[in-house]
Amino acid sequence: MHTPESEARRRDAADPGHRHLFHVPPADGGRYPDAAYLAGNSLGLQPRATRDELVADLDAWRRLGVEGHLEAERAWLPYHELLTAPAARLVGALPTEAVVMNSLTVNLHLLMVSFYRPAGERTKIVIEDSAFPSDSYAVRSQARFHGLDPDATVVRLKPRPGSDTLGTQEVLDYLDREGHTVALLLLGGVNYLTGELMDIPAITAAGRAAGAVVGWDLAHAAGNVPLALHEWGVDFAAWCSYKYLNSGPGALGGVFVHERHHGDPSLPRFEGWWSTEAATRFEMTAVSRPPATVEAWQISNPPIFAMGPVRTSLELFDAVGMPALRERSRRLTGWLEELLDEVTPGRPLTVVTPRDPDRRGCQLSVRVGTGSAGELTKRLRHEHGVIADAREPDIVRFAPVPLYSTYHDCWRVAEALAATVSQEGS
Ligand SMILES: *Cc1c(COP(=O)(O)O)cnc(C)c1O
């Protein structure tokens, strides 16, 4: 590798990011106090502000007991509303279109209750062949729930032969041919495995023009790439908050439902007391009165101590802003790509993420040609303090996260790969 470490240091001084706002854990049980943490696509780091905010919510419970519902500084009854506006800004939604609740796969199911309604020849659910397993299991179980054969109902779109990524054109071509049979198109905005960013507006427009409902799993897109879900006309979307949104393991997810579906009495929906209008929630009526907003999709009263970390994180995204993050993301990921271009030739390593910065977020996925991805990831951690994430059998994912990753982290990735993976023929 010919790029010197000093060049990484120079870039960090010029473009420092917000690492000081996060706890960066050591690698390998403390052997590397300064880990190169590239696994933010799997679990984001803890903001320094999170603990105090969480303790403040706990204290309110200690001091106030049941009165905290109304009298806590951040009263529990409307607590979720504190998250709504920043969540909406993050995904480009109207405030009535976004809500934080539950976890991702649960939300996908709740949304499919409303938006997967097979009828006549229009029964198919289209996902990508490299969909995250939870999404595959969810759509297959939805097909069975409707009495349909999942093998015949779920279509898995594959990349063209010779291509590692699906490509927006493949999706559009499929819709051209088979759109009339598609009830629901449910793709990942950024693919978890390859890091490919789909053309969400183009696919959404084509899917809807074909008469399908278009939903997006934004697990790897929320907090990673700019989104304009309302403007793009997306029917619904769901995301998790523990990856790029740094809200902690198993954190609450977010949901978007386009306002054109609000208050539609023909949509089936599962309800509970949080589905009804807040103003009448305690009138203890027998029949609900759902508001004409996405909040109608809520069911239960939310876990307050799980909401604090999401709130803290969303405030950070508001403060820094997605446009600035996206710019730094392009610089950092572009630099990691340049460094990988120095070390991959002659080694059994191939970057499978699209090279076009408009077709990816901040993750670069590397296919390893020999040995297992898990073994390589272990060696990177133990021998170099580089924390990456393996997807067996052969993909290692590196995510330089614009909030807290550094140019030096990227330099260490390339150096560690060069040291760990032998050159072919040597
Ligand atoms: C991370 C991820 C999930 C995880 O689902 P949970 O319900 O939050 O456990 C699901 N789908 C995709 C695409 C993911 O990336």
Image (cartoon, helix red, strand yellow):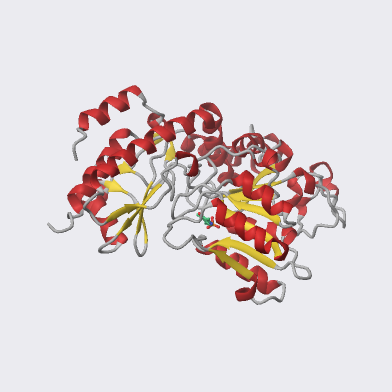
Q: Position of residue 200 (x, y in %)?
A: 60, 46
- The quarter holding residue 74 reads top right
- The quarter holding residue 413 reads top left
Viewer-closest of 409 and 309: 409
Left or right placement of residue 64 versus residue 134 in this view: right
Residue at the spot 41% in from the left edge and 29% down from the top edge: 18
Viewer-closest of 3 and 396: 3
Residue at the spot 25% in from the left edge and 64% down from the top edge: 371
Viewer-closest of 25 and 386: 386
Left or right placement of residue 410 versus residue 220 in this view: left
Q: Position of residue 262 (x, y in %)?
A: 79, 47
- The quarter holding residue 14 reads top left
Left or right placement of residue 362 versus residue 268 in this view: left
In this rendering, the count of numbered labels is 0
Q: In the image, is residue 18 above or below residue 99?
A: above
Furthest toward the top, the residue is: 14
Q: Position of residue 356 (x, y in %)?
A: 44, 42
Residue 67 visible from this viewpoint: no
Q: In the image, is residue 250 above or below residue 6?
A: below
Q: In the image, is residue 332 above or below residue 66?
A: above
Residue 280 visible from this viewpoint: yes
Q: Quadrant of the N terminus?
A: top left
Left or right placement of residue 130 versus residue 270 in this view: left
Residue at the spot 22% in from the left edge and 52% down from the top edge: 382
Residue at the spot 35% in from the left edge and 39% down from the top edge: 24
Q: Position of residue 146 (x, y in %)?
A: 72, 72
Q: Quadrant of the C terminus?
A: bottom left
